[in-house]
Every structure is written in C-alpha cells, then in structure tokens.
Image: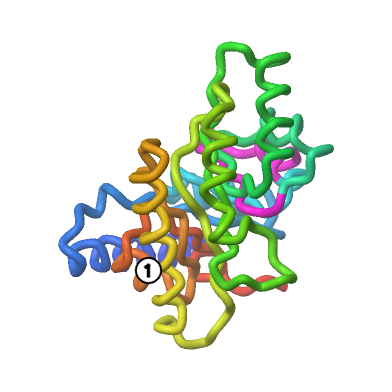
Amino acid sequence: MTQLAERLAEVQRRVAKAATDAARDPSEITLIAVGKTFSAEIVRAAVEAGATDLGENRVQEGVAKKPLVPSARWHLIGPLQRNKAKAAIESFDFIHTVDRPELADRLQTLLVEHWPERRLPVLLEVNVGREPQKAGVMPDDAQGLLRHAAACDRLDVRGLMAIPPWGDDPEASRPYFRELRRLRDALQEAVGTPLPDLSMGMSHDFEVAIAEGATMVRVGTAIFGRRG
C-alpha cells in the first residue's frame, strides 16, 4: 500500500509537470485511477492516498466495489451494453463511452423514469483509429451522434473520449490525440454545444495527451502496478 501511495504521488507530479510544460493549469486535468481487476481493498487504499476519481472498464466491477470504497467520483470507461445501462447509472457518476444513438436513448429513458431530477455527465467515444474491432463512433459520424445525444435533455454531453491504436512509443498516440481535439473544436462550432472535456491518455502516453489538450487522463498500471 505504501508503494501504491508513492506511485500515485509520482503520477500526480507527472500530470502537474505535463500541464505546466504545456502552459496549462494543472487543476484543469482530472486524474482517473483505473482499478480494473484490482480488489476493492486496493482501490480503497488509492482513495485514502489521495485519488478522487476512479475508473472501471466493466459495470459489474463498479457495482461490486463502490459500496466498499470511500467517497469518490466513479467513471465508466469501458463499453456499455444497453442491458447494463440501469446498473451503470446507479453506480457511476460519469460515463465516457456513449457511442451510438440507441445507447443515448436508453440512458435518457432510464433517467426520465427513475432519476427525473438527475442530469448524467457523458462523453461520446470516438474511434479515432478507425479500428474495426474497437467501440466508438467513427469520426465522420460524430456530428450526428452529438446532435442526437444533445437532444436528450437528461444527458449532459461534456465532450469526447478516445482510445488510440496501441503503440509502445507515446509519440505514436499524438496524431490521434490531436485529431480528437480538432474534431471536438469542429463539433463545438458546427453544433453550438460546449464540449469542455477530452478524455484521452493512459499510463504510457498521458503526458502527450495533456500536451494535446486532455482534461481527463485514465491511468491504471502506473498507479496500481501490473495486473496479474
């Protein structure tokens, strides 16, 4: 647990330095500690060490861990199926992976029926690498999805999220991060919807993501260590 606290502090330091190097305010960057496959006990230790935002790839992991972990803001960063949408709304404060109109409609319907006073912050996931095996709306279709989701008044569409093609070199991610930022800027102008958030960057490339405009970085291994 001491090592976890040290790793978290080091990542926080690197986030702050990357922001400063990019002439940005470090407070603009939300560090999401991704506890995928790690126990609730370990995730709890991360919160006790100073993590304020937690990420999970699977709805069921968040459902199981949240009651055992001190107060934090929970982010769903993995694909969401329509049949898991109600559980996701119950357990997560922020959903990063709205990638099709049908999912936006499902979330809207559930919110109207069960949480009529709530607006759910969401991001639209974009498949910036145009990889057929990955989730996410294609960049050319993002404007249509944004218009659809923005019309769902229970959804607070905050911006875009992406997972670029994997590469060992962090610089390989830069063109994709830059494309996502440019797409966000174009969508804001075309649709007139403010999109302040960009969720991009993981353990190996979050500093490049911050340089390219990320407001949320999703870091697992660099905080929790290698998964077994």
Q: Looking at the image, which residue is at 53% across and 42% down?
A: 146
Looking at the rendered structure, the kind of residue marked 1 is: Arg
Q: Looking at the image, which residue is at 26% across and 61% down?
A: 16
Q: Looking at the image, which residue is at 51% across and 34% down?
A: 121
Question: Which image quarter is the C terminus in?
Answer: bottom right
Q: Tell whether position 52 is magenta.
A: no
- Left/right placement of residue 195 relative to residue 27 reads right
Comparing 22 with 155, the one in front is: 155
Image coloring type? rainbow
Comparing 143 with 171, the one in front is: 143
**Image label count:** 1
* 65 shown above or below 26: above
Report the residue marked by disc 1.
178
Residue 202: image location, x then y, percent: 49, 67
- Left/right placement of residue 41 relative to residue 168 reads right
Q: What's drawn in magenta, residue-wise?
A: 62-79
Q: Looking at the image, which residue is at 44% across and 62% down?
A: 180
